[in-house]
Amino acid sequence: MTENDKIYNIEKQVIHILKNTFDPEIPVNVYDLGLIYEISVDKDCNVKIVMTLTAPNCPVVDELVNGIYESILGIEDVKGVDINLTFDPPWTTDMMSDEAKLELGYL
């Protein structure tokens, strides 16, 4: 497997994890909610995620971020995980996928 194949495979697995991680207050996964701003995997197989929350005072932030961290760290070949929370730009419902909008009645 080439380095690019390995990185692509890790990215696919990260997206799969994010699509199976649900915001405890909204029955939609964090990926389709639009909470994930960036996913990158470097040549050393370190994963970096830049994400936000639906609200800055989210009461389950630690549980949510730790769950994502542990799940991604469990992917074969991943050497490290760095999750950065940002609120710039602030999350809005416009960031949701069409699937999430449909699920929540926005379409």
Image (spheres, rainbow, N blue to C red):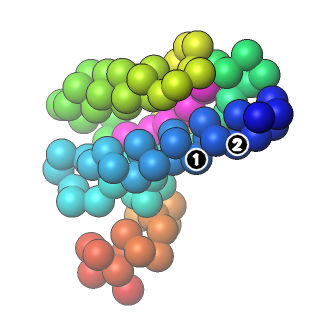
Quickly name the residue at label 2: 8
> In the rendered image, is residue 54 in sight?
no
Horizontal side, residue 32 vs residue 7: left or right: left
Horizontal side, residue 105 vs residue 25: left or right: right
Q: Which mark is residue 90?
A: none
Please name the amino acid that badge 2 sits on. Tyr
Near-viewer residue (54 or 75): 75
- Residue extending furthest front? 1
Image point 51% across, 47% down: which residue? 15
Horizontal side, residue 13 vs residue 5: left or right: left
> In the rendered image, is residue 68 in sight?
yes
Quickly name the residue at label 1: 12
Q: Looking at the magenta stretch, what is its main secondary structure? A: strand
CA neighbours of label 2 inside 10 A, class few (<14), some (14 to 19), many (20+): some
Query: Is residue 93 shown above or below 15?
Result: below
Image point 70% across, 42% down: which residue? 8
Image point 42% across, 45% down: which residue? 18
Residue 11, quarter of the rendered image: top right
* Quarter in which the C terminus is drawn: bottom left
Q: Position of residue 90 (x, y in %)?
A: 49, 45
The residue range painted magenta reads 47-53
Please name the amino acid that badge 1 sits on. Lys
